[in-house]
Amino acid sequence: MSRKKLIAANWKMYKNPSQTDEFFRGFLPLVFGHIGHSERRQYFGETDDTVNLRLKAALEHDLTPIVCVGEVLEEREAGLTEDVLRRQCLRAFHAISGKKASKLVIAYEPVWAIGTGKTATPQMASEAHVLIRGEAAKAFGDEFATGLRILYGGSVKPDNATALMSEEAIDGALVGGASLDPKSFAAIVRY
Ligand code: PGA
């Protein structure tokens, strides 16, 4: 089963409404030709007004994330990545088991790669994603795990996006710093 890639921007509190408008005015023309017509309508609408409405709708949803990022550098260097991820998966899956898990998206973000300019290699990220998917299969079953999207986050930039996204186990990206600028985020979306 092939999962559709998802590229997400993690803006935190960086943009106010007028900066957000400005971002989309620059961003949308750069990606319009690169996504299908139905997605264009689904995600962006056809006009600036619709964009604003959709953004608002997303903000008003209850999208509380369960945060348990990946391993710190010392843990990776000590060969503890797998243990840490297993433990975090257990905790996170326990927290959502009572809720509807069908819309779940997971981002694996090794702490040492967030905002540092150090990216996990495609192979490192891929190995972590395979492990997380295995844990999801144990918690929720194989079918669920096969459809689950697992994004990679941590210094994703235009020049490393293609290699990361080429991995079958990586279903998209959670982009921090590089998502703030319309040109660099569009370049990642167009990888
Ligand atoms: P980064 O941030 O892309 O700047 O490393 C990742 C994140 O904020 O999720």
Image (spheres, helix red, strand yellow):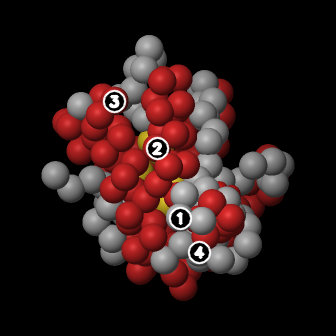
| Distance Cα–Cα, label 3 vs label 2 | 11 Å
Q: Nearer the viewer, mark 4 or mark 3?
A: 3
Q: Are marks 1 and 3 in contact (CB under 8 Å)?
A: no
Answer above or below: position of 56 versus 112: above
The residue depicted at 43 percent of the width and 59 percent of the height is 128
Q: Position of residue 160 (x, y in %)?
A: 51, 81
**Residue wearing tag 3:** 139
**Residue wearing tag 4:** 119
| Distance Cα–Cα, label 4 vs label 1 | 18 Å
**Label 1, residues with CA under 10 Å away: few <14, some 14-19, many ≥20:** few
Kind of residue indicated by mark 1: Gly
Kind of residue indicated by mark 2: Arg
Mark 1 / mark 2, whichever is N-terminal: 1
The residue depicted at 45 percent of the width and 66 percent of the height is 125
Answer above or below: position of 141 versus 157: above
Mark 2 / mark 4, whichever is N-terminal: 2
Q: Nearer the viewer, mark 4 or mark 1?
A: 1
**Residue wearing tag 1:** 79
User: Is residue 61 at all visible to an observer of this figure?
Assistant: yes
Q: Quadrant of the C terminus?
A: bottom left
**Residue wearing tag 2:** 86
**Label 2, residues with CA under 10 Å away: few <14, some 14-19, many ≥20:** some
Q: Nearer the viewer, mark 1 or mark 3?
A: 1
| Distance Cα–Cα, label 1 vs label 2 | 13 Å
> Is the CB of the residue bearing disc 1 within 8 angstroms of ligand 1?
no
Kind of residue indicated by mark 4: Thr
